[in-house]
Image (spheres, rainbow, N blue to C red):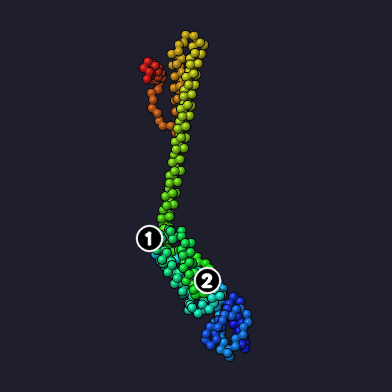
């Protein structure tokens, strides 16, 4: 920093030197070269840096809802050139003094807040620390440039519990979303099935209508082309044809179950009679 050469001393940039004469403060030496006649009782007591300095303070305290937290405050400060003698002589340990004030303010502010509020009001806590330090340290020749609350760290068990609460809340939201999606799928599936059944019913109705129309045309055509036949005779022949077609389909299907039905000309006549009687009874007793 300063170098003695004969009676001269060099003071570096961003630094001041404290000059004493016979043990008493004499003056503050600015950066540059100065004469220091030691034979006249002049001597250099020390140097004082004017550079910006930073102090990180970690303070353990408790919130209003009884959660222990570690609050980390970052204080940026520097000595005031015009009050260099106060900064050099009045404080033995500047960093310890600043740390004590930070502890005092944080332990007075944070216990008034719940944990969530402490996270939200970091700037207010930092402003309170800065105001208190500014009032106290200006008397000792120091300027508080800025104070930041850089971290608020709860106890590990509290952090784990908070993470579990957050995870549970997210799981509830996900479950609700999944249930809502399944509900929509079921509704759409039901709507699709209803539409399919409706269209299937229309198809069956049209099919039956086509069968009825075809049978009517067949009966009329057969009666005209074959003299002496009645509608009953034609219907019996149609039923016999349908009967044999059904037997053919049952026999052609390899995966069909065994079906035991009476077979023979008499059985065909009985089937035709039962169908005809059923139709006549239905026409006589409408629902």
Label 2 neighbourhood size at 10 Å, few (<14), some (14-19), many (20+)? some
Q: Nearer the viewer, residue 47 or 283?
A: 47
Q: Which secondary structure, mark 2?
A: strand
**Which residue is nearer to you in this view: 26 or 36?**
26
Q: Residue furthest top?
A: 228
As helix, strand or loop, the secondary structure at mark 1 comes to: loop
Instruction: Between residue 192 and residue 5, name the one nearer to us.
Output: 5
Mark 1 or mark 2: name the one nearer the start of the chain. Answer: 1
Residue bearing mark 1: 65
Q: Position of residue 198 (x, y in %)?
A: 46, 29
Question: Which residue is located at x 47 percent, y 32 percent?
Answer: 195
Tag 1 and tag 2, C-beta contact below 8 Å: no
Q: Who is closer to the viewer here, 276 or 258?
A: 276
Q: Where is 183 relative to 267, above or below?
A: below
Q: Residue furthest bottom?
A: 39
Q: Residue at x 45, y 32 (%)?
A: 194
Q: Exactly how many numbered labels are in the figure?
A: 2
Q: Where's residue 94, x and y in %?
A: 49, 75
Q: Quadrant of residue 265?
A: top left
Q: Residue at x 61, y 87 (%)?
A: 7
| Quadrant in which the C terminus is drawn | top left
Judge the density around disc 1: few (<14), some (14-19), many (≥20) Cα neighbours within 10 Å.
few
Please indicate, yes or no, whether residue 25 appears anywhere in the rendered image.
yes
Q: Which mark is residue 143?
A: 2
**Residue 258 in the image: x percent, y percent?**
40, 30
């Amino acid at each position: 920093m300063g170098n003695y050469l004969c009676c001269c001393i060099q003071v570096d940039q961003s630094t001041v030197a404290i000059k004493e004469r016979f043990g008493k403060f004499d003056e503050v030496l600015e950066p540059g070269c100065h004469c220091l006649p030691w034979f006249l009782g002049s001597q250099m007591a020390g140097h004082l840096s004017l550079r910006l300095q930073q102090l990180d303070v970690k303070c353990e305290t408790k919130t209003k809802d009884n959660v222990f937290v570690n609050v980390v405050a970052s204080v940026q400060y520097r000595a005031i050139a015009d009050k260099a003698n106060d900064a050099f002589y009045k404080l033995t340990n500047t960093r310890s003094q600043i740390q004590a004030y930070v502890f005092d303010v944080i332990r007075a502010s944070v216990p008034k807040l719940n944990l969530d509020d402490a996270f939200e009001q970091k700037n207010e806590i930092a402003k309170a620390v800065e105001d208190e330090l500014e009032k106290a340290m200006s008397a000792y020749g120091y300027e508080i440039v800025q104070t930041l609350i850089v971290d608020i760290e709860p106890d590990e068990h509290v952090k784990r519990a908070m993470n579990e609460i957050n995870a549970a809340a997210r799981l509830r939201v996900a479950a609700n979303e999944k249930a809502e999606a399944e509900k929509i799928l079921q509704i759409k599936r039901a709507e699709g099935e209803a539409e399919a059944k409706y269209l299937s019913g229309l198809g069956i109705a049209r099919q039956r209508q086509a069968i009825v129309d075809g049978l009517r045309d067949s009966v009329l055509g057969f009666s005209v082309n074959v003299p002496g036949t009645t509608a009953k005779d034609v219907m019996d022949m149609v039923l016999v044809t349908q009967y044999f077609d059904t037997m053919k389909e049952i026999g052609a299907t390899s995966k069909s179950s065994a079906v035991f039905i009476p077979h023979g000309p008499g059985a065909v006549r009985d089937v035709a009679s039962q169908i005809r009687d059923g139709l006549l009874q239905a026409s006589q007793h409408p629902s």
